[in-house]
Amino acid sequence: MSSFPQRPKSHISGDEAVRIFTSTCPPDWIISPVQPDYGLDLRIELVRDNQVTGEEFYVQIKGRNQIQAPNKQAVEIEIPQSTINYWLGKLHPVLIVLVDVSRKLFWFDWLEYAYSGYPRSKDEQHSVSLTLNGVGAKDSIINDIPNYLTQYFTRLRADLGNLFESTQLTRILLHVSALHRLCAQMAMTLQGDHVKEPKDLKKIFYWFYLEFGLHDEFLVSLWENYTASQAQISSKMAEILGSKLHSYVGIREKFFVREHRQQAGDFWFIPVKYSDLVTNLLPMFAVLSEIEDMLLQALILGKIIFPKIS
């Protein structure tokens, strides 16, 4: 008899867990699967009075059989710290759901309440035990989720307003966008065949370093001024942006080291690292894309208008 691939039980329980949770959601909510799945299963957007609100949240759903929870009390779930760090990098809130597929019960809680270190990420490899206090029921889903999202986005908009005012994030966005465009132009130049002379290619590298260094100087300076003045203030938006800028600096250091700059007359220059720039150009482009996209989302969520720049 021919053999065929078998479907793991974990896949079956996972799909059943998603069905159990979504069956309690109002039919007008917009539910979309997240692909690829790196620790998030669903993206859900609320609809209020037949109006699409733009209030979205992510959901991570785990399915189990025979969960031990006397009297339906709170349950605990183990989540890798790396996954939590990924969730913390999202501007929208994350709901964690654990489903007992055999009894069709589930527990849920928001990352903000379940993770004691919120909103700070940690550079650790172990798993973290999260406590889920909400017991799933249609009434609790219909009431608790909209109430939390109202509070969350109200706080986020206030947070964004304060952050934009204190850090001039619109200017950070301008420099991030300039760096993003510069990397895209450099990548297209290197892939083309119109530059054939080594001296012309060398000149292009030098001009790239010159313009990159200019915008990088402004970007780093703006952020350092903010962190120096707001060191004791915890802000989700600031944590997300700080984490992504940390990734930016990590990639930048591989081809553009500010500490290696040298003086030539009245000017400073940084030695060009040709092969390192080529190797890290696309990773740099990717992280700048993430930062630019996040700042644009923040502008929309916070309803911030660009200030006049003299």
Image (cartoon, rainbow, N blue to C red):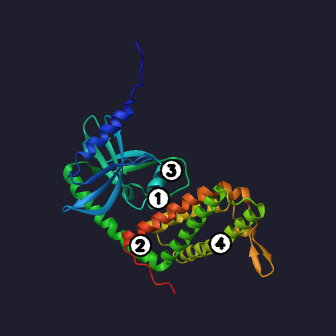
Label 1 residue SS: loop
The amino acid type, in three-letter code, at marker 3 is: Ser
Label 4 residue SS: helix
How far across and down, in percent of the image, does residue 284 sit?
Answer: 59, 59
State the separation of the CA atoms marked 2 and 3: 26 Å
Callout 2–callout 4 Cβ contact below 8 Å: no
194 versus 298 height, above or below: above
Closer to us: 66 or 94 = 94
The amino acid type, in three-letter code, at marker 4 is: Glu
State the separation of the CA atoms marked 4 and 3: 35 Å
Residue farthest toward the top in the current orientation of the protein: 1
Which label lies toward us, 4 or 3?
4
Which label lies toward us, 2 or 4?
4
Closer to us: 2 or 132 = 2
From the image, tell me which residue sits under label 4. Answer: 211
Label 2 residue SS: helix
State the separation of the CA atoms marked 4 and 1: 29 Å
Label 4 or label 1, whichever comes before in sequence order: 1
6 versus 269 height, above or below: above
Residue farthest toward the bottom in the current orientation of the protein: 310
Callout 1–callout 3 Cβ contact below 8 Å: no
Label 3 residue SS: helix
Label 2 or label 1, whichever comes before in sequence order: 1
From the image, tell me which residue sits under label 2. Answer: 160
The amino acid type, in three-letter code, at marker 1 is: Gly
From the image, tell me which residue sits under label 1. Answer: 89
How far across and down, in percent of the image, does residue 71 sit?
Answer: 24, 43
Residue 82 bears which disc, if any? 3
Q: In which image quadrant can residue 235 be found?
A: bottom left
